[in-house]
Image: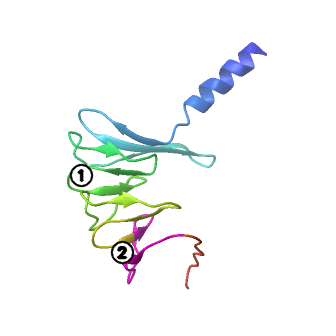
Amino acid sequence: MKRLALILVFIISGCSVGYKKTPENITWTTWNEGNGQVIVRLPNADPTSFIAIDESYGKDRFRVYFEGKEIEGADPETFQTIRWYFSKDSRAAYYREKEIVGASVSHLHLSAVVVTQRP
């Protein structure tokens, strides 16, 4: 039984999700049942200024990232997460890594959200 518990602890600890920073680069790691561990290298990220906001969002002095993908045009200085994968900066609102076209940043408030995908 102790052996099984040790194996489970090893497996679970190896399935961490989030950003990892080394002096040379930044990676975002995830795990899924189909592919196992997936590591995405962020080639344009600046390791000297990079911070992980949470396990999904990170930023450096030049760019903002969602799960290893750059959020095009997002301003790292004013960027903030809201909730449910929504975020904003001084110029735009975002869902995951995509800009929400036409959203009013100054009036953005989430109380209940229904997201549908159009064909």
Residue 61 visible somewhere in the drawing = yes
Q: What element carries label 2?
A: helix
Q: Which residue lies furthest to the right in this view?
A: 1
Gap in Å between the C-alphas at discs 2 and 1?
Answer: 27 Å
Instruction: Assign the N terminus to one quadrant of the image.
Output: top right
Q: Quadrant of residue 6?
A: top right
Percent coordinates x, y for residue 28 in the rendering:
41, 45
Percent coordinates x, y for residue 109 in the rendering:
47, 71
Percent coordinates x, y for residue 18 in the rendering:
45, 43
Magenta-highlighted residues: 94-110
Q: In this view, does 65 lie to the left or right of 34?
A: left
Percent coordinates x, y for residue 83 in the rendering:
50, 60
Q: How many labels does the image show?
A: 2
User: Which numbered disc covers residue 44?
Assistant: 1
Q: Is residue 119 above or below residue 110?
A: below
- What is the crowding at mark 2: few (fewer than 14 residues within 10 Å), some, or many (at least 20)? some
Q: In which quarter of the image is residue 72?
A: bottom left
Type of amino acid under label 1: Asn
Q: Is residue 67 above or below residue 11?
A: below
**Residue named by callout 2:** 105
Type of amino acid under label 2: Val
Q: What residue is rendered at 39% in x and 52% in y?
A: 68
